[in-house]
Amino acid sequence: MKKDKLSHCATLITLLVCSLVTPAPSQVAQSPAGATIQTTTSSTPPRDERLWREALKIQRKSIVVDTHNDITGMMIDDGYDLGTSSIGKYHTDLARMKEGGLTAEFFSIYVDRKYAKDGGSARRALDQIDLVYRAAERYPDKMMMATSVADIRRAKKQDKIAALMGIEGGHAIENSLMALRDFYRLGVRYMTLTHNNTNDWADACCDTSRHNGLSDYGREVVREMNRLGMFVDVSHVSDKTMADALDISTAPVIASHSSARALNSHLRNIPDDLLRRIAKNGGVVMVNFYPVFIDQKALDANKERNERLKPQLDALNER
Ligand SMILES: [Zn+2]
């Protein structure tokens, strides 16, 4: 039954066409941290008004789910209130979610790697979960908490944003299946097995490999997520962790914010063989429009800049 629930949910997930919410000569992209970046290019052709209206009509009729939004980080660190305009500051607020035709948002419960080192990972996650609930309490006419497909449909009917949550960084459970179950009870419906850091049971894309993919305990975590009905999210994990998760998961696996490695060599992107396996598994890959993930030139320029500025950055870090 859990598996069916997840499959159903996966079929409902459609790509959020971010560009629909912004003026024509702009392009919108998501950074690795999830903050949206807006760029303007002089070469963008003028908008076809008829097509634009058609696209908006389809967008407004559809159930549109965005599977990863890091605005929660701004809510906790900057005290940002989701119901106020964030124009010029961030790229998400309730008014613009509605204007863009969004039905459901997965608020990212992102836990930085520093908490894995210093302690407090679960507490950091709990505090962000509280803030999502508090926003829903503050704006009951605009958003509602959601933990199921039925809730998302209800939100659509009531013209509200369905607020869902996904933990980003498996270290948030502090190696405890009890904590994992508690997070599920609080409404968390996916967990990204790692962030960019390898944790005690899973290797990450962009860190040293310690487990050759998933450890035995990592496999147990995946099995428990399956049993609970929590999506296994493979964005940020190493290729081997991804393959291991696909080997053992009995439910569709998602990549909440990843792009294609064949088009751009960034390690955060997914190689073709694994993309095919995710499709076969009934999962979905939600494309991340961060330029460094989709444009090889942007990635190369980024690498070159990081190498060039490394001495300065190292010096700053030492202070
Ligand atoms: Zn991420």
Image (cartoon, rainbow, N blue to C red):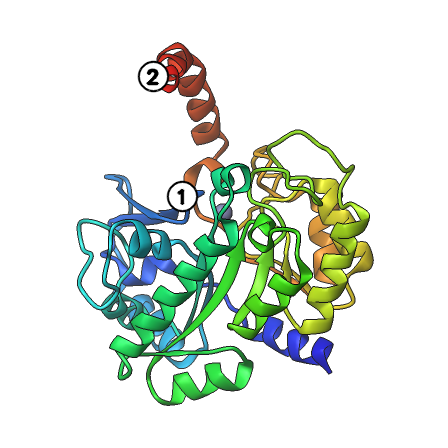
Residue 91: x and y in percent read 28, 54
Q: How many angstroms separate mark 2 from mark 1 (CA)?
A: 27 Å
The image quadrant where one finds the C terminus is top left
Residue 299: x and y in percent read 47, 29
Q: Nearer the viewer, residue 254 or 296?
A: 254
Residue 112: x and y in percent read 47, 43
Question: Which element type, helix, strand or loop, lies under badge 2?
Answer: loop
50 to the left or right of 241 = left
**Residue 229 position (above or below residue 280):** below
96 to the left or right of 218 = left
Q: Nearer the viewer, residue 251 or 302?
A: 251
Q: Residue at x 23, y 62 (%)?
A: 81
Amino acid beneath label 1: Ser
Give the labeled residue for mark 1.
31
Q: Is residue 104 visible?
A: yes
Question: Which element type, helix, strand or loop, lies under badge 1?
Answer: loop
Residue 57: x and y in percent read 35, 77
Total marks shown come to 2
Q: Quadrant of residue 306?
A: top left
Q: Residue at x 66, y 73 (%)?
A: 229
**Residue 70 position (above or below residue 42):** below
Q: Is the distance from the Cβ of mark 2 to the nearest ligand 1 atom less than 8 Å? A: no
Give the labeled residue for mark 2.
319
